[in-house]
Image (tube, helix red, strand yellow):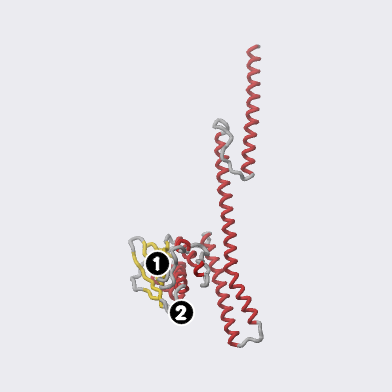
Amino acid sequence: MILICIWAITTTILLLLLIVKNKITYRKLNETLEKIIDGKSITEIPFNESELSLLSNQLKTISNKLDFEIGRADSEKEQIKQLISNMSHQLKTPLANVMMYEELLDSNDLSEAKRADFMKKLKAQSEKINWLLESLFKMSKLEQNVIEFDITETGIKTTIRNAVNAVYEKAEKKKIEIHVADFEDIVLLHNPKWTSEVFENLLENAMKYTADSGSIEISVECLETYSMIHVKDNGIGISKEDIPYIFNRFYRSEKVNEIEGSGIGLYLSKIILEKEKGYMTVKSEIGKGSVFSVFLQNC
């Protein structure tokens, strides 16, 4: 009987201790979950190894993942905000010009010559808006991997020729000579349509920052793993301070604010080349022009 009483008392005490311990554990668990729900970071889990160690590790993992996802969401939100701001800034001027020319064209006092001039300027601004929207659309789709991007083993000569043909009329207007050094066609891994756009962007940039009657040279150099396509101009050049940033989205140097531009072309070209496992470099000196070199993989 005494032994039974001792066993009963001992069991009761153990049960009471277990209940108290479970209450403490429950309280700790509840406090931890509340922190996670409130978005607070958990640096320490309040259980020792003997108390729900598996659950402790899982809670810490969940907390870390939530911190990561929240950080990424905040980053994406800021990127979207910045993108919208930049888009608004880029479109503001041409839209204002379109509205201005439309108002001028409504005047009955315009001569035929003035009317034709304003119509020409209105068309140019409309084309600029269209180009900006198309470029922003391409940039967004490429960044989000929405566009299907096929890479094929294709000769580079036709790709370069298509880019030169696309800008030939503009080059003629500025009396800029585009010279393509003779070379044997090389089969490279690339997407002809998108890579042609890369070279078109580089040629457009070269013409933009090169004075009338200047020159642009295109040459091809074959290496062991990659081939380099150089686009060299004798324009105003790029300062050393600006070179690290020129491939950033919407970047434009304060030194060229008076020259029309959007800061999209080089960034878009960089994304295209990354999709092809290629890349681009630049060498430049103020007053002596620039050389952009596109690297594409040999087959």
- For label 2, the residue is 174
Residue 123 point in image, percent of width and height: 57, 78
Residue 21 point in image, percent of width and height: 63, 28
Residue type (three-letter) at the residue carrying disc 1:
Thr
User: SS at mark 1?
Assistant: strand
Q: Is residue 272 visible?
A: no
Tell me: residue 266, above or below residue 8. Answer: below
Tell me: residue 125, above or below residue 38. Answer: below
Q: Is residue 139 visible?
A: yes
User: SS at mark 2?
Assistant: loop
Q: Quadrant of residue 107?
A: bottom right
Horizontal relation, residue 61 to residue 207: left or right: right
- For label 1, the residue is 154
Horizontal relation, residue 233 to residue 1: left or right: left
Image quarter in which the C terminus is found:
bottom left
Horizontal relation, residue 50 to residue 200: left or right: right
Residue type (three-letter) at the residue carrying disc 2:
Lys
